[in-house]
Every structure is written in C-alpha cells, then in structure tokens.
Amino acid sequence: MSDMSTLLEQQIPALRRYALGLSRDDHTADDLVQDCLERAISRWFLRRQGGDLRAWLFAILRNLYISSCRTQSRRATSMAIEEIIASDGYPDPEARLETRDILVALDQLPEEQKSILLLVGVEDFTYEDVARMLGVPIGTVMSRLSRGRQRLRTILGTGQPTLIRRVK
C-alpha cells in the first residue's frame, strides 16, 4: 500500500493542474483529483504493470471530467478569470492581461481540443501518450491539436503562435 500511495502522491500536483485547467474552479478541480485517486486506488489491480501510471491517471481524470459535464448542463465558470490571474501572482500587468485572454479563449474551445492542448502544451505529454490516453489514433491527436491551436489564434486575433505552442 505504501508503494502505491507514494506513486500516487507524486502525481497529485500535475493532476490538480490539469483538473484546474479543465474545470477553472478550485473546488471542482479538488473533487476531480480526489475522485480520480479514489478510482485509481479501487482499480489498482486493473493497472497494467509496467504501464505509464501518469497517463493512466490523466485518462481517469479526463473521463471523470467528461462524465461530470454530461450529467450537468453546461454551467457558467464559477471562478472569475480575474481570481485565477490574481492567485497566480503575475507582477506584470501585460502578463496578466495575456493570461486572462488565453484562459478566456481556452474556455471557448471544444472539450476535445481544450483537453489535448492542455495535455500537450501544459502537461508535456507526447502525442503517443495522449493518443493512448484518449483511445484515438495519433493522427487524430495531431489534427485536434492543430485545429485547437489555430482556433485559439483566431479567437485571440493573432496569427502568431500562442504561449501554448509546443512542437514534439
């Protein structure tokens, strides 16, 4: 049990960051991470030995998020963008505005594009890892990522790559 808890504990910060990126709410993110960890512990025996634990946990978290979105009607963001930016402690007003614009633009993307952008651009997963997590071909990951980046640029009104640009 201690080996499992040590392995899971190491993943909590990344899981929380991803959950917060998906939900934009501290309490919802905490609930998602807790549900993810509970599910992982209860299904630990189903995990592939030698498999990527991080990818398995992120897939569980994403599936829980999608399930919660399906059971609830789309609700408004319960945490104001200004609260997120203020909590990050950006000293530069320009950086605050740019971050706010990117967060607002991310919320306008379809879930599959938003999720892939966060997994590749923020959590630094490879295309192969994301494809395995989502159960889609690698080409689908690449096309959704490309469309998501382009749509983000369009929303932001810039032809320049955004902060989330990462080439694998």
Image (spheres, helix red, strand yellow):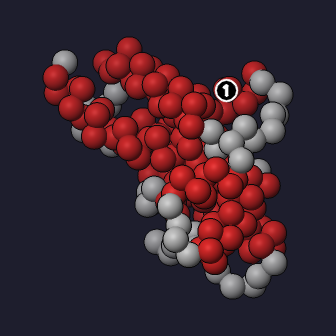
Give, as a three-letter code, the residue at label 1.
Ser
Which of the two residues, 33 or 42, is positioned nearer the viewer here? 33
- Which SS class for mark 1? helix
Name the image quarter holding the N terminus.
Answer: top left
Quadrant assignment, res 138 = bottom right
- The image shows residue 149, relative to residue 78, as above or below, that is below
In the picture of the structure, the residue carrying the numbered disc 1 is: 67
> Which x, y percent locates residue 79?
68, 42
Whether residue 12 appears in this view of the structure is yes
Instruction: Classify residue 46 as left or right of residue 153.
Output: left
Residue at horizontal 58 percent and vertical 56 percent from the top: 86
Instruction: Classify residue 52 as left or right of residue 108.
Output: left
Residue at horizontal 16 percent and vertical 27 percent from the top: 3
Quadrant assignment, res 102 = bottom right
Outermost residue toward the top in this view: 42
- The image shows residue 8, relative to residue 2, as above or below, that is below
Whether residue 131 appears in this view of the structure is no
Residue at horizontal 72 percent and vertical 37 percent from the top: 78
Outermost residue toward the bottom in this view: 160
- The image shows residue 83, relative to residue 158, as above or below, that is above
> Which x, y percent locates residue 21?
58, 48
Q: How many tags in the picture?
A: 1
> Which x, y percent locates residue 111?
71, 47
- The image shows residue 138, relative to residue 50, as above or below, that is below
> Which x, y percent locates residue 103?
68, 59
Residue density around tag 1, few if under 14, some if 14–19, many if 20 or more, within 10 Å: few
Instruction: Classify residue 144 as left or right of residue 87.
Output: right
Outermost residue toward the left in this view: 2
